[in-house]
Image (spheres, helix red, strand yellow):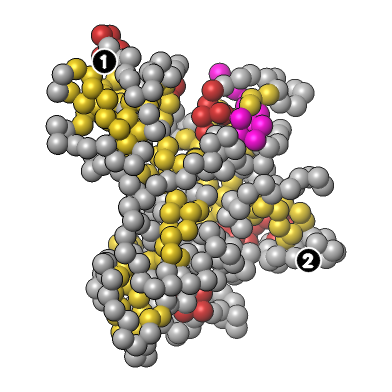
Amino acid sequence: MRLQRKLMNGLAVAALCAGLGAATSAHAQEYWQSASNPTTEDYVKVPLPPGFSVQATPLEGPVFADSQGKTLYRWPLKQLRNGDLGDRRGQPSTCTDEVTTTNTGLMSPYPGGYELPELDKRPSCVEVWPPVLADEGAEPVGKWATVKRDDGSLQWTFDGNPLYTSVLDKKPGDVNGGTKFEPANDGPAVREPVGPPPNAPPAFAVAQMTTGRMLVSYEGYAIYASDNDDLNKSNCTGACLDDWKPALAPETAQPQGEWTINERSPGIGQWAFRGKPLYTYVGDTRYRSFLGSDVPGWSNVFTQRAPAPPPEFTIQDARLGHVLADAQGRSIYVYNCGDDAPDQLACDHPTTPQAYRFAICGGGDPDKCLETWPYVLAGENAAGENSLWSIVYIDPQTGRFAEPDQAGALRVWAYRDRPVYHFVDDKRAGETRGDGWGEFYGYRNGFKAFWLRDDFLDNAG
Protein backbone atom coordinates (compact mmCIF):
# COMPACT_ATOMS: atom_id res chain seq x y z
CA MET A 1 0.00 0.00 0.00
CA ARG A 2 1.32 3.44 -0.90
CA LEU A 3 -0.47 6.39 0.59
CA GLN A 4 0.07 9.97 -0.43
CA ARG A 5 -0.77 12.53 2.23
CA LYS A 6 -1.10 16.23 1.70
CA LEU A 7 -0.37 18.47 4.69
CA MET A 8 -2.58 21.55 4.96
CA ASN A 9 -0.92 23.58 7.72
CA GLY A 10 -0.81 20.46 9.84
CA LEU A 11 -4.61 20.17 9.96
CA ALA A 12 -6.30 18.69 6.91
CA VAL A 13 -5.44 15.99 4.40
CA ALA A 14 -6.16 16.65 0.75
CA ALA A 15 -5.56 15.21 -2.67
CA LEU A 16 -2.11 15.32 -4.21
CA CYS A 17 -1.14 16.34 -7.69
CA ALA A 18 -2.33 14.40 -10.73
CA GLY A 19 -0.73 11.02 -11.34
CA LEU A 20 0.00 10.27 -7.68
CA GLY A 21 -3.53 9.39 -6.65
CA ALA A 22 -5.04 10.51 -3.37
CA ALA A 23 -5.79 9.06 0.01
CA THR A 24 -6.58 10.25 3.48
CA SER A 25 -4.89 9.30 6.72
CA ALA A 26 -5.16 10.31 10.33
CA HIS A 27 -1.38 10.18 10.55
CA ALA A 28 -0.92 13.52 8.76
CA GLN A 29 -3.06 15.21 11.39
CA GLU A 30 -1.40 13.14 14.08
CA TYR A 31 2.08 14.29 13.14
CA TRP A 32 1.52 17.99 12.62
CA GLN A 33 -1.02 19.54 14.96
CA SER A 34 0.87 22.61 16.07
CA ALA A 35 -1.22 25.05 14.01
CA SER A 36 -4.27 24.18 16.11
CA ASN A 37 -2.44 23.08 19.26
CA PRO A 38 0.40 25.51 19.98
CA THR A 39 0.76 24.30 23.58
CA THR A 40 4.35 24.35 24.81
CA GLU A 41 5.89 21.97 27.28
CA ASP A 42 5.58 22.74 30.98
CA TYR A 43 8.78 22.49 32.99
CA VAL A 44 10.04 22.36 36.57
CA LYS A 45 10.86 25.84 37.81
CA VAL A 46 14.52 25.75 38.86
CA PRO A 47 16.61 28.56 40.37
CA LEU A 48 18.52 30.65 37.82
CA PRO A 49 21.52 32.94 38.18
CA PRO A 50 20.80 36.63 37.54
CA GLY A 51 20.31 37.40 33.86
CA PHE A 52 19.45 33.87 32.78
CA SER A 53 16.01 32.76 31.60
CA VAL A 54 14.04 29.87 30.12
CA GLN A 55 13.02 30.17 26.46
CA ALA A 56 10.33 28.11 24.72
CA THR A 57 11.62 26.61 21.46
CA PRO A 58 9.48 25.07 18.70
CA LEU A 59 11.30 21.73 18.54
CA GLU A 60 13.52 21.26 21.58
CA GLY A 61 11.11 22.38 24.28
CA PRO A 62 12.20 24.71 27.11
CA VAL A 63 15.89 25.69 27.10
CA PHE A 64 18.08 27.88 29.25
CA ALA A 65 19.19 31.18 27.72
CA ASP A 66 21.69 33.91 28.56
CA SER A 67 20.91 37.59 29.08
CA GLN A 68 20.58 38.07 25.28
CA GLY A 69 18.15 35.15 25.00
CA LYS A 70 20.68 32.87 23.30
CA THR A 71 20.27 29.16 23.94
CA LEU A 72 22.78 27.47 26.25
CA TYR A 73 24.49 24.22 25.21
CA ARG A 74 26.66 21.55 26.73
CA TRP A 75 29.17 19.23 25.06
CA PRO A 76 28.63 15.82 26.68
CA LEU A 77 31.49 13.36 26.52
CA LYS A 78 30.93 10.75 23.82
CA GLN A 79 32.67 7.45 23.25
CA LEU A 80 33.86 7.36 19.65
CA ARG A 81 35.29 4.34 17.85
CA ASN A 82 38.87 4.90 19.04
CA GLY A 83 38.47 7.20 22.00
CA ASP A 84 36.19 9.87 23.40
CA LEU A 85 35.74 13.61 23.04
CA GLY A 86 33.69 16.26 24.78
CA ASP A 87 33.59 17.77 28.26
CA ARG A 88 33.76 15.72 31.42
CA ARG A 89 31.33 16.73 34.14
CA GLY A 90 32.95 18.78 36.86
CA GLN A 91 36.07 19.42 34.77
CA PRO A 92 37.20 22.54 32.86
CA SER A 93 36.06 22.98 29.28
CA THR A 94 38.03 21.28 26.52
CA CYS A 95 36.80 23.86 23.98
CA THR A 96 39.68 26.29 23.58
CA ASP A 97 40.89 29.15 21.34
CA GLU A 98 43.39 26.88 19.57
CA VAL A 99 42.70 26.35 15.86
CA THR A 100 43.03 22.64 15.14
CA THR A 101 44.70 21.65 11.88
CA THR A 102 44.54 17.84 11.72
CA ASN A 103 42.02 15.10 12.47
CA THR A 104 42.25 12.91 15.56
CA GLY A 105 41.79 9.43 14.09
CA LEU A 106 39.14 8.69 16.73
CA MET A 107 36.58 7.89 14.03
CA SER A 108 38.06 4.82 12.31
CA PRO A 109 39.02 3.88 9.62
CA TYR A 110 40.69 7.28 9.31
CA PRO A 111 44.08 7.54 11.05
CA GLY A 112 45.01 10.79 12.75
CA GLY A 113 47.20 13.45 11.24
CA TYR A 114 45.32 14.29 8.03
CA GLU A 115 45.10 18.01 7.34
CA LEU A 116 41.63 19.51 7.73
CA PRO A 117 40.02 21.46 4.85
CA GLU A 118 39.93 25.25 4.54
CA LEU A 119 42.55 25.89 7.23
CA ASP A 120 42.82 29.52 6.17
CA LYS A 121 39.20 29.99 7.25
CA ARG A 122 38.93 27.46 10.09
CA PRO A 123 37.76 29.03 13.36
CA SER A 124 38.74 27.95 16.83
CA CYS A 125 36.28 26.09 19.03
CA VAL A 126 35.50 29.17 21.15
CA GLU A 127 34.74 31.22 18.03
CA VAL A 128 31.99 28.73 17.12
CA TRP A 129 31.00 27.92 20.71
CA PRO A 130 31.59 31.01 22.88
CA PRO A 131 31.82 29.97 26.53
CA VAL A 132 29.21 31.45 28.86
CA LEU A 133 31.44 33.48 31.16
CA ALA A 134 30.68 34.40 34.74
CA ASP A 135 31.73 37.51 36.65
CA GLU A 136 34.28 37.21 39.40
CA GLY A 137 32.45 36.39 42.60
CA ALA A 138 29.47 34.77 40.84
CA GLU A 139 27.63 32.64 43.36
CA PRO A 140 26.44 29.06 42.71
CA VAL A 141 22.66 28.71 42.40
CA GLY A 142 21.06 25.26 42.60
CA LYS A 143 22.83 23.15 39.94
CA TRP A 144 24.53 26.26 38.54
CA ALA A 145 28.20 26.74 39.38
CA THR A 146 31.41 28.00 37.77
CA VAL A 147 34.64 26.40 36.63
CA LYS A 148 37.93 28.11 35.85
CA ARG A 149 39.10 28.04 32.23
CA ASP A 150 42.74 27.73 31.19
CA ASP A 151 42.95 31.50 30.67
CA GLY A 152 41.75 32.13 34.24
CA SER A 153 38.23 33.26 33.33
CA LEU A 154 35.18 31.69 34.96
CA GLN A 155 32.66 29.70 32.91
CA TRP A 156 29.15 28.86 34.01
CA THR A 157 28.26 25.19 34.39
CA PHE A 158 24.94 23.44 34.90
CA ASP A 159 24.94 20.07 36.65
CA GLY A 160 28.72 19.99 36.17
CA ASN A 161 28.63 20.66 32.40
CA PRO A 162 30.40 23.77 31.03
CA LEU A 163 27.99 25.96 29.06
CA TYR A 164 28.26 27.62 25.63
CA THR A 165 26.24 29.59 23.12
CA SER A 166 26.26 28.98 19.36
CA VAL A 167 27.19 31.47 16.63
CA LEU A 168 24.39 29.93 14.51
CA ASP A 169 21.69 31.23 16.86
CA LYS A 170 20.57 34.75 15.96
CA LYS A 171 17.47 35.36 18.07
CA PRO A 172 15.81 34.06 21.26
CA GLY A 173 14.36 30.58 20.72
CA ASP A 174 16.88 29.60 18.01
CA VAL A 175 18.43 26.18 18.55
CA ASN A 176 20.50 25.85 15.38
CA GLY A 177 23.71 24.87 17.12
CA GLY A 178 22.70 21.46 18.43
CA THR A 179 19.79 19.23 19.31
CA LYS A 180 18.34 16.99 22.03
CA PHE A 181 18.00 14.13 19.54
CA GLU A 182 19.99 11.16 20.80
CA PRO A 183 23.20 11.02 18.72
CA ALA A 184 23.78 7.94 16.61
CA ASN A 185 26.53 5.56 17.73
CA ASP A 186 28.52 6.36 14.59
CA GLY A 187 27.92 10.10 14.77
CA PRO A 188 30.25 12.80 16.08
CA ALA A 189 30.32 14.20 19.62
CA VAL A 190 27.66 16.86 19.13
CA ARG A 191 26.49 19.67 21.41
CA GLU A 192 23.00 19.72 22.85
CA PRO A 193 20.80 22.43 24.35
CA VAL A 194 20.37 22.50 28.11
CA GLY A 195 17.08 23.17 29.82
CA PRO A 196 14.97 22.50 32.88
CA PRO A 197 13.40 19.07 33.37
CA PRO A 198 9.84 18.51 32.09
CA ASN A 199 7.13 18.91 34.71
CA ALA A 200 6.13 15.25 34.72
CA PRO A 201 5.70 12.57 37.39
CA PRO A 202 8.73 10.30 37.96
CA ALA A 203 7.10 7.46 36.00
CA PHE A 204 7.36 9.45 32.75
CA ALA A 205 9.97 11.06 30.54
CA VAL A 206 9.95 13.17 27.38
CA ALA A 207 11.74 12.00 24.23
CA GLN A 208 12.86 14.32 21.45
CA MET A 209 11.35 13.23 18.13
CA THR A 210 11.17 14.81 14.68
CA THR A 211 7.46 15.39 15.23
CA GLY A 212 7.80 16.94 18.68
CA ARG A 213 8.37 16.15 22.33
CA MET A 214 6.86 12.69 22.85
CA LEU A 215 5.76 11.32 26.20
CA VAL A 216 7.27 7.96 27.17
CA SER A 217 7.41 5.78 30.26
CA TYR A 218 10.56 5.94 32.37
CA GLU A 219 11.63 2.71 30.64
CA GLY A 220 11.29 4.46 27.27
CA TYR A 221 8.05 2.95 25.91
CA ALA A 222 5.56 5.20 24.12
CA ILE A 223 2.53 6.56 25.97
CA TYR A 224 -0.85 6.61 24.20
CA ALA A 225 -4.30 8.13 24.59
CA SER A 226 -7.69 6.96 23.29
CA ASP A 227 -10.29 8.99 21.43
CA ASN A 228 -12.94 6.88 23.14
CA ASP A 229 -12.09 8.16 26.61
CA ASP A 230 -13.87 11.06 28.24
CA LEU A 231 -12.15 13.91 30.01
CA ASN A 232 -10.35 12.40 33.01
CA LYS A 233 -12.34 9.16 32.59
CA SER A 234 -11.13 5.94 31.01
CA ASN A 235 -13.55 3.86 28.95
CA CYS A 236 -10.98 1.15 28.24
CA THR A 237 -12.32 -1.92 30.02
CA GLY A 238 -12.79 -5.62 29.36
CA ALA A 239 -11.14 -6.80 26.11
CA CYS A 240 -9.58 -3.36 25.61
CA LEU A 241 -7.23 -4.12 28.49
CA ASP A 242 -5.79 -7.09 26.60
CA ASP A 243 -3.90 -4.63 24.37
CA TRP A 244 -3.71 -1.46 26.43
CA LYS A 245 -2.26 -1.16 29.92
CA PRO A 246 -3.34 1.85 31.98
CA ALA A 247 -0.50 4.00 33.32
CA LEU A 248 -1.27 3.47 36.98
CA ALA A 249 -0.48 6.06 39.61
CA PRO A 250 0.87 4.97 43.02
CA GLU A 251 -1.32 5.56 46.05
CA THR A 252 0.94 8.38 47.22
CA ALA A 253 0.84 10.24 43.86
CA GLN A 254 -0.69 13.70 43.72
CA PRO A 255 -1.98 15.71 40.74
CA GLN A 256 0.50 18.28 39.47
CA GLY A 257 0.32 20.90 36.75
CA GLU A 258 -1.27 19.36 33.65
CA TRP A 259 -1.34 15.93 35.31
CA THR A 260 -4.41 14.49 37.01
CA ILE A 261 -5.36 11.10 38.42
CA ASN A 262 -8.65 9.41 37.59
CA GLU A 263 -10.00 6.51 39.65
CA ARG A 264 -10.40 3.28 37.67
CA SER A 265 -11.69 1.39 40.67
CA PRO A 266 -11.56 1.97 44.43
CA GLY A 267 -7.92 2.62 45.35
CA ILE A 268 -6.63 2.26 41.74
CA GLY A 269 -5.66 5.51 40.04
CA GLN A 270 -4.64 6.14 36.44
CA TRP A 271 -2.53 9.06 35.23
CA ALA A 272 -4.09 11.52 32.81
CA PHE A 273 -2.26 14.26 30.89
CA ARG A 274 -4.25 17.32 29.88
CA GLY A 275 -7.35 15.32 30.77
CA LYS A 276 -6.51 12.29 28.59
CA PRO A 277 -6.05 8.97 30.47
CA LEU A 278 -2.72 7.37 29.58
CA TYR A 279 -1.72 3.86 28.47
CA THR A 280 1.11 1.77 27.10
CA TYR A 281 0.56 -0.62 24.18
CA VAL A 282 1.17 -4.34 24.67
CA GLY A 283 2.18 -4.67 21.01
CA ASP A 284 5.15 -2.31 21.31
CA THR A 285 8.42 -4.21 20.95
CA ARG A 286 10.72 -1.20 20.77
CA TYR A 287 11.19 2.05 22.61
CA ARG A 288 9.55 5.28 21.38
CA SER A 289 7.26 3.40 19.02
CA PHE A 290 4.40 4.74 16.91
CA LEU A 291 2.91 1.29 16.38
CA GLY A 292 0.00 1.85 18.74
CA SER A 293 -1.07 4.91 16.77
CA ASP A 294 -1.87 2.61 13.85
CA VAL A 295 -4.79 1.26 15.89
CA PRO A 296 -7.89 3.33 15.02
CA GLY A 297 -8.79 5.75 17.78
CA TRP A 298 -5.38 5.68 19.49
CA SER A 299 -2.52 8.17 19.30
CA ASN A 300 0.88 8.94 20.77
CA VAL A 301 0.93 11.70 23.38
CA PHE A 302 3.14 14.78 23.01
CA THR A 303 3.95 17.50 25.51
CA GLN A 304 4.35 19.79 22.49
CA ARG A 305 4.19 19.38 18.73
CA ALA A 306 6.76 20.43 16.18
CA PRO A 307 5.59 23.16 13.81
CA ALA A 308 4.14 22.03 10.52
CA PRO A 309 6.47 21.81 7.51
CA PRO A 310 5.72 23.86 4.39
CA PRO A 311 2.09 23.24 3.34
CA GLU A 312 3.05 21.91 -0.10
CA PHE A 313 5.08 19.09 1.47
CA THR A 314 3.58 15.61 1.78
CA ILE A 315 3.95 12.48 3.87
CA GLN A 316 4.75 9.24 2.06
CA ASP A 317 4.71 5.61 3.09
CA ALA A 318 8.28 4.40 2.64
CA ARG A 319 10.04 1.10 3.24
CA LEU A 320 10.73 1.84 6.89
CA GLY A 321 7.87 4.16 7.74
CA HIS A 322 6.68 7.68 7.02
CA VAL A 323 8.99 10.10 5.25
CA LEU A 324 8.60 13.78 4.45
CA ALA A 325 8.38 14.51 0.72
CA ASP A 326 7.63 17.30 -1.72
CA ALA A 327 4.35 17.77 -3.59
CA GLN A 328 5.40 15.18 -6.19
CA GLY A 329 6.13 12.60 -3.50
CA ARG A 330 9.94 12.79 -3.80
CA SER A 331 11.57 12.10 -0.43
CA ILE A 332 13.38 14.89 1.37
CA TYR A 333 16.82 14.40 2.95
CA VAL A 334 18.88 16.20 5.57
CA TYR A 335 22.67 16.32 5.50
CA ASN A 336 24.75 15.43 8.57
CA CYS A 337 28.42 16.27 9.07
CA GLY A 338 30.88 16.53 11.94
CA ASP A 339 34.62 16.59 11.39
CA ASP A 340 37.05 14.28 13.19
CA ALA A 341 39.01 17.07 14.84
CA PRO A 342 39.52 17.41 18.61
CA ASP A 343 36.82 20.10 18.75
CA GLN A 344 34.32 18.08 16.64
CA LEU A 345 33.04 21.13 14.78
CA ALA A 346 29.96 20.63 12.65
CA CYS A 347 30.26 20.80 8.85
CA ASP A 348 26.58 20.54 7.91
CA HIS A 349 25.76 24.25 7.65
CA PRO A 350 26.33 26.61 4.69
CA THR A 351 28.71 28.68 6.84
CA THR A 352 30.98 25.64 7.40
CA PRO A 353 33.42 23.88 5.01
CA GLN A 354 31.62 22.30 2.05
CA ALA A 355 34.52 20.00 1.09
CA TYR A 356 33.01 17.13 3.10
CA ARG A 357 29.63 17.30 1.36
CA PHE A 358 31.14 17.78 -2.10
CA ALA A 359 33.26 14.67 -1.54
CA ILE A 360 30.22 12.59 -0.56
CA CYS A 361 27.70 13.84 -3.09
CA GLY A 362 29.90 14.30 -6.15
CA GLY A 363 33.50 13.26 -5.64
CA GLY A 364 34.42 16.90 -5.08
CA ASP A 365 32.54 18.18 -8.13
CA PRO A 366 29.80 20.75 -7.28
CA ASP A 367 28.05 20.14 -10.61
CA LYS A 368 27.93 16.39 -9.94
CA CYS A 369 26.50 17.13 -6.50
CA LEU A 370 23.72 19.19 -8.05
CA GLU A 371 22.91 16.25 -10.30
CA THR A 372 23.08 13.56 -7.61
CA TRP A 373 21.76 15.48 -4.60
CA PRO A 374 19.73 18.46 -5.89
CA TYR A 375 18.41 21.02 -3.46
CA VAL A 376 14.69 21.10 -2.68
CA LEU A 377 13.72 24.28 -4.50
CA ALA A 378 11.17 26.67 -3.01
CA GLY A 379 8.43 28.03 -5.24
CA GLU A 380 8.25 31.70 -6.10
CA ASN A 381 5.32 32.29 -3.75
CA ALA A 382 6.52 29.94 -0.99
CA ALA A 383 7.34 31.40 2.40
CA GLY A 384 8.71 29.99 5.64
CA GLU A 385 5.96 29.91 8.24
CA ASN A 386 7.94 29.10 11.39
CA SER A 387 11.49 29.17 12.75
CA LEU A 388 12.18 25.53 11.84
CA TRP A 389 11.45 25.89 8.13
CA SER A 390 12.84 28.79 6.14
CA ILE A 391 13.86 29.74 2.62
CA VAL A 392 17.52 30.47 1.96
CA TYR A 393 19.57 31.39 -1.11
CA ILE A 394 22.52 29.12 -1.95
CA ASP A 395 25.42 29.48 -4.36
CA PRO A 396 25.48 25.94 -5.84
CA GLN A 397 29.15 26.22 -6.81
CA THR A 398 30.30 26.94 -3.26
CA GLY A 399 27.45 25.55 -1.16
CA ARG A 400 27.47 28.79 0.82
CA PHE A 401 24.70 31.28 1.46
CA ALA A 402 24.13 33.74 -1.40
CA GLU A 403 22.37 37.04 -1.86
CA PRO A 404 18.91 36.81 -3.48
CA ASP A 405 20.06 38.78 -6.52
CA GLN A 406 23.31 36.85 -6.97
CA ALA A 407 23.66 35.29 -10.42
CA GLY A 408 22.93 31.56 -10.31
CA ALA A 409 21.72 31.59 -6.70
CA LEU A 410 19.12 28.94 -5.85
CA ARG A 411 16.09 29.58 -3.66
CA VAL A 412 15.82 26.46 -1.51
CA TRP A 413 14.03 25.12 1.53
CA ALA A 414 16.01 24.85 4.75
CA TYR A 415 15.34 22.95 7.97
CA ARG A 416 17.02 24.39 11.06
CA ASP A 417 18.82 26.83 8.73
CA ARG A 418 20.29 23.96 6.68
CA PRO A 419 19.28 23.18 3.08
CA VAL A 420 17.35 19.98 2.37
CA TYR A 421 17.84 17.73 -0.64
CA HIS A 422 16.43 15.14 -3.05
CA PHE A 423 18.24 12.02 -4.33
CA VAL A 424 18.55 11.39 -8.04
CA ASP A 425 17.75 7.64 -7.87
CA ASP A 426 14.40 8.10 -6.09
CA LYS A 427 12.03 7.49 -9.00
CA ARG A 428 8.73 6.78 -7.24
CA ALA A 429 6.85 8.42 -4.41
CA GLY A 430 8.16 7.24 -1.06
CA GLU A 431 11.45 5.79 -2.30
CA THR A 432 14.41 6.42 0.03
CA ARG A 433 17.33 4.97 -1.90
CA GLY A 434 19.62 7.68 -0.59
CA ASP A 435 18.98 7.02 3.10
CA GLY A 436 22.30 6.38 4.84
CA TRP A 437 24.37 7.62 1.88
CA GLY A 438 27.83 8.54 3.12
CA GLU A 439 30.13 7.68 6.00
CA PHE A 440 28.81 5.58 8.87
CA TYR A 441 25.30 5.29 7.36
CA GLY A 442 25.13 9.03 6.80
CA TYR A 443 25.49 9.97 10.46
CA ARG A 444 29.03 11.33 10.38
CA ASN A 445 29.14 12.71 6.86
CA GLY A 446 26.18 11.94 4.64
CA PHE A 447 22.46 12.04 3.98
CA LYS A 448 19.49 10.71 5.92
CA ALA A 449 15.86 10.68 4.81
CA PHE A 450 13.60 13.04 6.75
CA TRP A 451 11.90 10.30 8.75
CA LEU A 452 8.71 11.13 10.61
CA ARG A 453 8.66 7.55 11.84
CA ASP A 454 10.90 4.66 10.85
CA ASP A 455 9.46 1.61 12.58
CA PHE A 456 7.67 -0.24 9.75
CA LEU A 457 10.52 -2.64 9.01
CA ASP A 458 11.11 -3.41 12.67
CA ASN A 459 7.48 -4.45 13.13
CA ALA A 460 7.05 -6.31 9.86
CA GLY A 461 7.58 -9.66 11.55
Foreground mark, 2 or 1? 1
In the rendering, at what x and y percent does residue 34 appear?
Answer: 55, 38
Question: How many numbered discs, if any?
Answer: 2
* SS class, disc 2: loop
Residue furthest out toward the top: 238
> To which residue does mark 1 refer?
241
Mark number, residue 403: 2
Instruction: Name which of mark 2 and mark 1 comes first in the sequence.
Output: 1
- Residue nearest the observer in this picture, 47 or 27: 47
Q: Compared to 258, does 69 lie above or below? A: below
Q: Residue at x 71, y 26 (%)?
A: 16
In the rendered image, which quarter is residue 457 located in?
top left
Answer yes or no: is residue 82 visible. no
> Which amino acid type is marked by label 2?
Glu
Q: Compared to 266, does 448 lie above or below? A: below
Q: Residue at x 39, y 73 (%)?
A: 50
